[in-house]
């Protein structure tokens, strides 16, 4: 009889241990789950969790999440500071740059020697370049920090191509360049406003670097996963060494300095492509021309 009693007590004890173990495991998993949910919502803080009630594993996770929440907050604050600084620079330089342009204009209206006229024109051109540079800096910094976000949505490519080509038709005609549109129908998932800006950058370069009498073509090629908006020209072409560098911020190839520009167009175009899951490809043969293709995904 006593033997049965001992066996019974032992069984009860064993059941109690198993039940406690299960309860403890379930509680730990629940606690870890709560911590991860709080971290994902951005509301995790060590104060929300009673350290004395946490197991070693939970405590380590809590410390890790606290550290990562802190570093994320630091990065966010730094980004905000940089972006505020750039906005301040842009705001504070607006009036002096506008004044520079105004005084250069007033100066050019005075009786000047030919050299004086050249200097007034140079001041005006440099002030304009400074303004373009500041605007480009503000735009890229806002894109990089995510203040300006892209909103890709299923859209027709045709409209984007037509609007961009229409903007560059007068400049092409002025420079005696035949701007033509090839097949350009298709639909993909992209942000129409920013994509138009990217296509405009490619057209701007093609029209700017192609000598008079040349040709620029914009067309759309549809593939299984991507659609490509391709801008090709009969311009000077780009060597392989330069092709690796031209997407860099403020990079301008040595031969490009006689044309207007600040070296930000291709950098911005690549940013726009990547922020909506696409990419930019360049094909070029020096002396024959270049083709830049902006790839955008056809599905999300
Ligand atoms: P920017 O045109 O203001 O210099 P981009 O970033 O648009 O700046 O282009 C970077 C460089 O790439 C240019 O300076 C030029 O050397 C080269 N490039 C871009 N597009 C073309 C083109 N279509 N033909 C020849 N060179 C080009």
Image: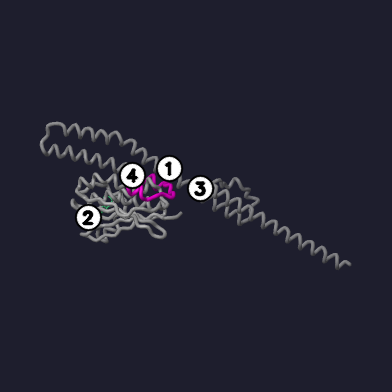
**N-terminal label among 2 and 4:** 4
Q: Are marks 1 and 3 in contact (CB under 8 Å)?
A: no
Mark nearer the viewer, 2 or 4: 2
Q: Are marks 2 and 4 in contact (CB under 8 Å)?
A: no
Considering every residue shown, the one lying at the far right of the view is 1
Position of residue 196 relative to residue 285, above or below, is above
Identify the residue at image location x=16%, y=32%: 109
CA distance for labels 1 and 3: 15 Å
Sort mark 2 into few (<14), some (14-19) or many (20+) by Cα contacts within 10 Å.
many
- State the residue position of label 4: 137
Identify the residue at image location x=39%, y=42%: 83
Identify the residue at image location x=72%, y=58%: 20
- State the residue position of label 3: 70
* Residue closest to the eye, 25 or 139: 139
- The residue segment tinted magenta is 137-163
Q: Is residue 157 magenta?
A: yes
- State the residue position of label 1: 80
CA distance for labels 3 and 4: 29 Å
């Amino acid at each position: 009889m006593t033997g049965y009693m001992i066996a019974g007590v032992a069984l009860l004890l064993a059941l109690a241990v198993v039940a406690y173990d299960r309860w403890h495991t379930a509680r730990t998993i629940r606690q870890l789950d709560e911590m991860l949910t709080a971290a994902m919502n951005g509301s995790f803080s060590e104060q929300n969790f009673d350290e004395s009630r946490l197991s070693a594993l939970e405590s380590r996770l809590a410390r890790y999440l606290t550290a990562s929440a802190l570093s994320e907050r630091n990065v966010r604050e730094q980004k905000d500071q940089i972006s505020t600084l750039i906005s301040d620079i842009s705001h504070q330089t607006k009036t002096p740059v506008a004044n520079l342009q105004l005084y250069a204009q007033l100066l050019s209206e005075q009786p000047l020697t030919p050299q004086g006229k050249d200097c007034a024109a140079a001041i005006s051109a440099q002030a304009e370049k400074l303004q373009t540079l500041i605007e480009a800096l503000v735009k890229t910094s806002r894109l990089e920090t995510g203040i300006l976000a892209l909103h890709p949505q299923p859209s027709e490519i045709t409209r984007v191509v037509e609007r961009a080509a229409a903007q560059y038709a007068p400049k092409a005609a002025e420079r005696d360049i035949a701007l033509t549109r090839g097949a350009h129908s298709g639909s993909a998932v992209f942000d129409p406003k920013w994509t138009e800006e990217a296509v405009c950058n490619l057209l701007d370069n093609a029209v700017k670097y192609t000598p008079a009498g040349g040709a620029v073509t914009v067309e759309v090629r549809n593939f299984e996963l991507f659609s490509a908006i391709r801008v090709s020209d009969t311009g000077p072409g780009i060597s392989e060494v330069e092709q690796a560098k031209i997407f860099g911020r403020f990079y301008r190839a040595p031969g490009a300095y006689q044309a207007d520009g600040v070296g930000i167009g291709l950098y911005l175009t690549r940013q726009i492509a990547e922020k909506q899951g696409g990419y930019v490809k360049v094909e070029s043969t020096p002396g024959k021309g270049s083709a830049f293709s902006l790839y955008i995904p056809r599905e999300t």
